[in-house]
Structures are given as structure tokens and as C-alpha cells.
């Protein structure tokens, strides 16, 4: 993939299918997103997203988290690879691993996560089942800057979907997936255009304080 000067450079962390990574790759190829993917890193060797990176000719690495007994050692290895690419932003796109405080501090305001719920509701795992169990009318996905609190960093963009009586957790995940793709591409577009930034724990959109997440 050719790299233009001044584009936002990103590094994408994945653990699985990589459909969100693919959405970024496709948007770049359609020239709808002025972002360069410096590299993709998976913590799971079987992640299909690694193949997507290979096909798109993007640098890709696997650091198998199962082969580390200490969380910090895994994170140190991750930091070494990330820093060798010097990205402007690290993107957690289906990265199913909790990162250490040290890691989060190092990439403060340069680390975003896609989470499959309408945060602050349903932090953590099994978000769709928990939304169904709670009788929610809507589910959705959020993009937030990552802080030391799990899924607790400032949220700047969300997408939502009405839940119907027939919905199950798995079909909600399926229905939500194309919305997540648009959401992540939109978030990257906004950051690449300097529309969104986190400064001293405060979110700004177009240089005005953003008090509520934007909805798409
Ligand atoms: C997405 O649904 C995301 O919300 C969740 O994991 C999934 C990753 O999907 N955290 P993919 O690997 O990008 O296809």
C-alpha cells in the first residue's frame, strides 16, 4: 500500500476475523480515508485478520499471547514492535486482551478502541447478551480513547441499533457488524482531519469541548 506524506499513520491490533481492519483497508483503497496502516499485530496466530493484512501487502506480526506467562513481557514485546513503526495512533479493532497501565500511559491520547456496546453500558465481554438480559431497546458500538479503566475512557462516537424481540446475541453481533465498520472508519477520518482530539482528559470536537458522544 502506498504511503502519502502527512496522512495519519496507524497501527492496528487485532485478535480475530479482522473485518474492521478490512473496512479500514477498503476505505483507504476507495480513497475515502487518508490514513496509512503502518502494520497490523495480532496476539493470536490463527487470527484471519493476519491474512487480510498479508493480502493487502501490509506489514503484519503475531505475538502469541499464550506463550507469555507475564502480561508485562507480552506488553513490552508489543511496545517494541509498535514503536519501531512510530505510528500516530494505535487502533484496537477487536483486540481481545487487556493492556497494562504502562502500555495505556505510553500511548495516552494515541490509543482508541472499538467496543460493541453503548458505553458506559456493558463494559467488558458478552455485551449483546447482557443488553438482551437487561431488556434494552437498543444496542450499539462505541469508539473511545483508552485509559487505565477497562472500556472506561472518553467516548467520542457511537452508532446504535434497535433491538427486536427476535434478536439473539449472535444475530445482534452480525447486524451490528456493518455499523461498526462505518463507525471505525468515521472515527479514523475525524482523527485524521484533526476534528477529534483528547487533551488533558478533555475531548474536543472542532476545538470545542465535546460533552456527549457524537452519534452516526
Ligand atoms: C467486533 O465486533 C468488535 O466490536 C469486538 O470484536 C469484534 C471484532 O471483529 N470487540 P473483527 O475481528 O474486526 O471482525
Image: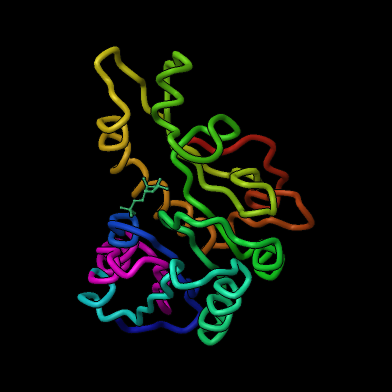
Going by the image, does 130 lie left or right of 58?
right
| Residue 135: quadrant of the picture | top left
Magenta-drawn stretch contains 127: no
In the foreground, 117 or 66: 66
Task: Give the percent coordinates (x, y) of residue 134.
Answer: 48, 16
Residue, far front:
69
- Residue bounds of the magenta highlight: 23-51
Residue, far right:
200
Magenta-drawn stretch contains 36: yes
Query: Split into 4 quadrants, where in the image is the C terminus?
Result: top left
Residue 26's place in the image compared with 55, above or below, is above
In the foreground, 158 or 20: 20
Task: Give the percent coordinates (x, y) of residue 31.
Answer: 30, 67
Q: Residue at x 42, y 27 (%)?
A: 139
Query: Split into 4 quadrants, where in the image is the N terminus?
Result: bottom left
Going by the image, does 6 lie left or right of 182?
right
Going by the image, does 203 lie left or right of 196?
right
Amino acid at each position: 500500500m502506498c504511503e502519502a506524506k502527512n496522512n495519519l499513520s496507524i497501527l492496528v491490533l487485532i485478535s480475530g476475523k479482522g473485518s474492521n481492519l478490512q473496512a479500514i483497508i477498503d476505505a483507504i483503497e476507495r480513497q475515502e480515508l487518508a490514513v496509512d496502516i503502518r502494520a497490523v499485530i495480532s496476539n493470536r496466530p490463527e487470527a484471519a485478520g493476519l491474512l487480510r493484512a498479508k493480502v493487502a501487502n501490509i506489514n503484519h506480526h503475531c505475538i502469541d499471547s499464550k506463550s507469555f506467562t507475564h502480561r508485562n513481557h507480552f506488553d513490552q514485546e508489543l511496545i517494541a514492535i509498535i514503536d519501531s513503526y512510530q505510528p500516530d495512533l494505535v487502533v484496537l479493532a477487536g483486540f481481545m486482551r487487556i493492556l497494562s497501565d504502562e502500555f495505556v500511559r505510553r500511548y495516552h491520547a494515541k490509543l482508541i478502541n472499538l467496543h460493541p456496546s453503548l458505553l458506559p453500558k456493558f463494559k467488558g465481554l458478552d455485551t449483546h447478551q447482557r443488553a438482551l438480559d437487561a431488556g434494552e431497546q437498543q444496542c450499539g458500538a462505541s469508539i473511545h480513547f483508552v485509559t487505565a479503566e477497562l472500556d472506561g475512557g472518553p467516548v467520542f462516537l457511537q452508532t446504535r441499533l434497535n433491538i427486536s424481540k427476535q434478536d439473539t446475541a449472535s444475530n445482534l453481533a452480525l447486524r451490528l457488524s456493518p455499523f461498526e465498520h462505518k463507525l471505525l472508519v468515521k472515527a479514523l477520518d475525524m482523527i485524521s482531519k484533526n476534528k477529534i482530539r483528547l487533551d488533558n482528559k478533555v475531548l474536543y470536537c472542532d476545538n470545542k469541548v465535546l460533552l456527549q458522544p457524537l452519534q452516526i
